[in-house]
Image (cartoon, rainbow, N blue to C red):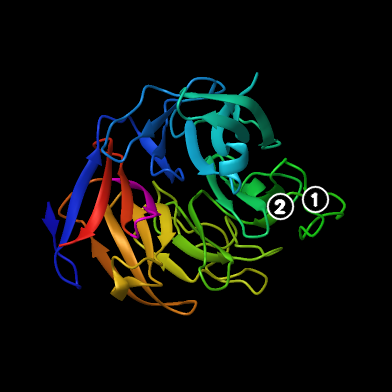
């Protein structure tokens, strides 16, 4: 399918289909892809579009509402140790919680071994929404994990003794880096990197600064793009552009506060962002340095033109498709790869 853009026509190519609620896409060194399906399956997809049977050995997941098997990333030493990292909604005796595990992948035998849970949220409330669960490997060998507020527990996003509504930073074995901003602070969870988040479902490293950038869902308006720095408060639910779903009433005390880091950009009405990638490839040279964000509610792909750390222009792409874009990745070929949640497809965006 050919679609329009400010840079001219683009081709959307279907690479694979038949997936159920695909959530995350990651590339293996040999060109094959890992794709998570939210009901609890991990698939290996070949470059020619062949989809494997489910990979065996994964832990049980709480596949209800927005929960299930969520993000997956390939470890930094995969060629040597075969490690992958994945996030999931882990069932507990009273509810469920966002958890992260690592495992050794045998892609040819379609199984994982040596599965080890390295992190789990400290609270496991009932409910089926706002898991967060995006994973980002940092250049220093640590792992960022985004954690939702679990919807009915939003006030806990401001509590430093809780993992709800936070971004955390851990070592690849689950231990706490000594330079975390709250390490050693009484009454605070040492894993916390930043707080005051609602439901972060997009995260990526800025290609120049190496800093973590995220976006998060607002309730009714107030989706945010944030540059996420150590030890900062991002406001939710005390400071937000969003409003209550049914009544439309204001949430919290306003849109700004001196001790709250303001968003780089906010979307009202909400686009329901999911997936995020800075573009650094050569297939679209005029888009180098741009940020791409999938949108569920508006069913499109957002291109943000950047000037350093400022957004100077927004373009909305793929509206002709009318599909929920769940994940956005830059492939090793320099093209943009998308997960179409609506139709269960992997799509590639090519110059036309």
Is 175 inside the magenta-drawn segment?
A: no
Residue 14 vertical placement versus 128 (above, below): below
Q: Which mark is residue 208?
A: none
Rendering quarter of residue 220? bottom left
Left/right of residue 80 with respect to residue 321 in the rendered view: right
Is 331 inside the magenta-drawn segment?
A: yes
Please report the residue visible at 37 percent of the width from the left and 72 percent of the height from the top: 288
Q: Which mark is residue 188?
A: 1
SS at mark 2 in the image: strand
The quarter of the image holding the C terminus is bottom left
Query: Would residue 267 be seen by someone viewing this image from the given angle?
Result: yes
Q: Pinpoint residue 28: horizontal percent, then vertical percent.
A: 45, 43
Front one among 320 and 95: 320
Please report the residue visible at 42 percent of the width from the left and 59 percent of the height from the top: 277
Please report the residue visible at 59 percent of the width from the left and 27 percent of the height from the top: 90
SS at mark 1 in the image: loop
Please report the residue visible at 52 percent of the width from the left and 44 percent of the height from the top: 73
Q: Which residues are magenta?
A: 324-334
Q: Which mark is residue 192?
A: 2
Q: Pinpoint residue 134: horizontal percent, then vertical percent.
A: 52, 47
User: Contact (CB < 8 A) between labels 2 and 1?
Assistant: yes
Dot 2: within a 10 Å radius of its alpha carbon, few (fewer than 14), some, or many (20 or more) residues? many
Residue 22 vertical placement versus 310 (above, below): above
Left/right of residue 224 with respect to residue 341 in the rendered view: right
């Amino acid at each position: 399918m050919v679609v329009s853009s400010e840079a001219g026509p683009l081709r959307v190519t279907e690479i694979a289909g038949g997936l159920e609620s695909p959530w995350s896409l990651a590339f293996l060194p040999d060109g094959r892809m890992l794709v998570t399906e939210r009901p609890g399956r991990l698939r290996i997809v070949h470059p020619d579009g062949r989809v494997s049977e489910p990979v065996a050995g994964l832990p049980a997941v709480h596949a209800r509402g927005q929960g299930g098997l969520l993000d997956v990333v390939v470890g930094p030493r995969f060629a040597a140790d075969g490690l992958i990292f994945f996030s999931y909604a882990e069932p507990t005796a009273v509810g469920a919680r966002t958890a992260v595990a690592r495992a050794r992948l045998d892609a040819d035998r379609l199984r994982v071994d040596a599965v080890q849970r390295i992190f789990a949220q400290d609270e496991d409330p009932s409910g089926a929404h706002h898991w967060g669960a995006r994973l980002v490997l940092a250049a220093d060998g640590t792992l960022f994990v985004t954690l939702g507020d679990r919807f009915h527990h939003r006030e806990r996003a401001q509590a430093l003794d809780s993992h709800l509504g936070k971004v955390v930073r851990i070592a690849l074995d689950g231990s706490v880096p000594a330079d975390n901003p709250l390490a050693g602070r009484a009454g605070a969870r040492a894993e916390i990197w930043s707080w005051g988040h609602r439901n972060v479902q997009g995260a990526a490293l800025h290609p120049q600064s190496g800093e973590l950038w995220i976006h998060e869902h607002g309730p009714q308006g107030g989706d945010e793009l944030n540059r996420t720095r150590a030890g900062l408060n991002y406001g939710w639910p005390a400071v937000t552009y969003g409003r209550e779903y049914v009544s439309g009433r204001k949430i919290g005390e306003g849109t700004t506060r001196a001790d709250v880091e303001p968003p780089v950009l906010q979307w009202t009405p909400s686009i329901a962002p999911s997936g995020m990638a800075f573009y650094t490839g050569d297939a679209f040279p005029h888009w180098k340095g741009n940020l791409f964000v999938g949108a569920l509610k508006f069913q499109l792909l957002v291109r943000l033109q950047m000037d350093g750390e400022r957004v100077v222009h927004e373009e909305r792409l793929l509206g002709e498709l009318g599909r929920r874009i769940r994940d956005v990745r830059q492939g090793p070929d320099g093209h943009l790869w998308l997960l179409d949640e609506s139709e269960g497809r992997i799509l590639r965006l090519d110059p036309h």
